Image (cartoon, rainbow, N blue to C red):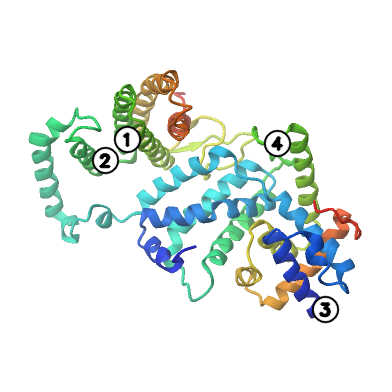
Amino acid sequence: MQDEPGLIERAKRKEAGALTTLYEAHFTRIYRYISLRVNDKTEAEDLTQQVFLKVIQSIDSYNSRGLPFSSWLFRIAHNQVIDHVRRRSRAPQSTEDVFELDQKGPSLEEKAEKKLMMETVKAGMKKLTPLQQEVISLRFAGGLSIIETAATMRKNEGAVKALQHSALSSLRRILGVPPTDERPI
Amino acid sequence: MNDQFEQILNSALDRVVMRGEPVDDVVNEFPDHADDLRPLVLAALKVRQAASQQPESGLKSRSLARFRSAVLSAQPRASRWSIPRIWHRGWVTIASVVVVFFAVVGTTAFAASGSMPDQPLYQVKLATEQIETVVTASPLGKAKVEARLAGKRIEELSYVIDRDKADAAEELSERLSSHYGRIEHLVQGEIESVPTADNPSNGQGLRPKTRPARVIRGDGEKAKQLTELRKLLKDNNPRHEEVVRNWELRGQGAVRPEVRRALQHSLKGHQQAITAVGDDD
């Protein structure tokens, strides 16, 4: 993003244009990250909105010398997800995954296939350790680099690479990815 | 050895999953590790694909309207209005509000009150409206002002659509969405969703999920204001729908889809504000 530090300084002064630019730049990545961590589409939408409300409230406390902005943002998203999971664990809940198919776009068959794959991957993710889930979600749903992931998780890069390796090894076994499958998915 | 493989794996993941290079091209660059590398990269691709769904088409814009509304609420008044700090204190504030009120009401504001977006006094009309929202103290009072202003925007929308002014129609639709976003935001502190079996939330979410909301705090005055707010919103709704229909009938939707989207979005915002305010018990 162009001149992110300048943008953040303006956002700290609560300038609407700067805050909106940050929102637009990060909305989809945060939504995808949260969608992979929660079962319900409505909850994913609400949590994504809450992340950005939190940004408005607490951007004053962001210090660019501490960690990249995207890492700070994903830490907020991570905390929202953890709070949400805690609340859900105390409340009666449905085990059904309620991500609905979009009304527009690919054919019904393709959508059904995609939904099935999404459910399979999410079910597989749940069998990983919390740290493994986090590294996979940040890297492949949030699209963070290894440096940003390390900053978000407050770990060093070597530890994150090792976690990434162990997580993908487990996930590969859980999802039954054959070693000889040469077709890109 | 493990460190070296983790380095190779990370580089392969960056290239395949993040940058979209073909799996075979990347994996075959590491023949000694290809058998181990391929299934891990494919597993990561599956996660990427599962997470690649786009947010529902309306979500981002709907959510953006609420975000903008929250940004407006968070802005310190001094920066929003560029008023020197001393003016926010004691008698200076009261005196200045009275002076501004009489000056505006007595002269220009009256002349501007009926102006339309293509007329010279329109900006004065908007400024007067802003003063009206600032001097109204209670959240429900502000929400009622916003609802009345939304009614004015609908009249203006009708005016510009009759004159085929697409840019003005788009801008007014966005203003309209902002009014409804602010109404939703303002009533949130006054009402709370009724918890239901399928919606155990305590109403802290930004969006009322399903059921109508009801007053759970406050006194009879608040209930009365909420009823008036409901009436304002509901009275405006048929006119708003008619204006959107009129745009469609004029066949402009196909020419300027962004205006159509903005109009539909404002209509959706209107309906969400009605839902947020809830029905009379």
Tag 1–tag 2 contact (CB < 8 Å): yes
Identify residue for label 1: B146
Q: What residue is rendered at 51% in x and 29% in y? A: B212
Q: For the residue marked with disc 3, what is the amino acid?
A: Asn
Chain bearing tag 3 is B
Q: Where in the figure is residue A149, as x and y percent of width and height? A: 64, 68
Q: If you read the primary sequence from the N terminus, does the residue marked by circle 1 or circle 2 appear first?
A: 2
Labelled disc at residue B2: 3
Q: Which one is in front in this view, the residue at disc 4 or the one at disc 2? A: 4
Q: Secondary structure at mark 1?
A: helix
Identify residue for label 4: A106
Instruction: Please name whichever residue, B93 or A14, is drawn nearer the observer in this view of the structure.
Output: A14
Q: Secondary structure at mark 3?
A: helix
Identify residue for label 2: B133
Residue A141 is at least partly visible in this image: yes
Q: For the residue marked with disc 4, what is the amino acid?
A: Pro
Q: Are callouts 3 and 4 both on one chain?
A: no
Q: Secondary structure at mark 2?
A: helix
Q: If you read the primary sequence from the N terminus, does the residue marked by circle 1 or circle 3 appear first?
A: 3
Q: Quadrant of residue B29?
A: bottom right
Give the CA separation, mark 1 to mark 2.
Answer: 7 Å
Q: Are callouts 1 and 3 both on one chain?
A: yes
Classify residue B161 as left or right of residue B200. left
Classify residue B39 as left or right of residue A66. right
Q: Are callouts 4 and 1 both on one chain?
A: no
Give the CA separation, mark 4 to mark 2.
Answer: 46 Å
Q: For the residue marked with disc 1, what is the amino acid?
A: Glu
Q: What residue is rendered at 12% in x and 44% in y? A: B100
Q: Residues within 10 Å of mark 1 (few under 14, many from 20)?
A: many
Labelled disc at residue B63: none
Q: Which one is in front in this view, the residue at disc 4 or the one at disc 1? A: 4
Give the CA separation, mark 2 to mark 3.
Answer: 64 Å
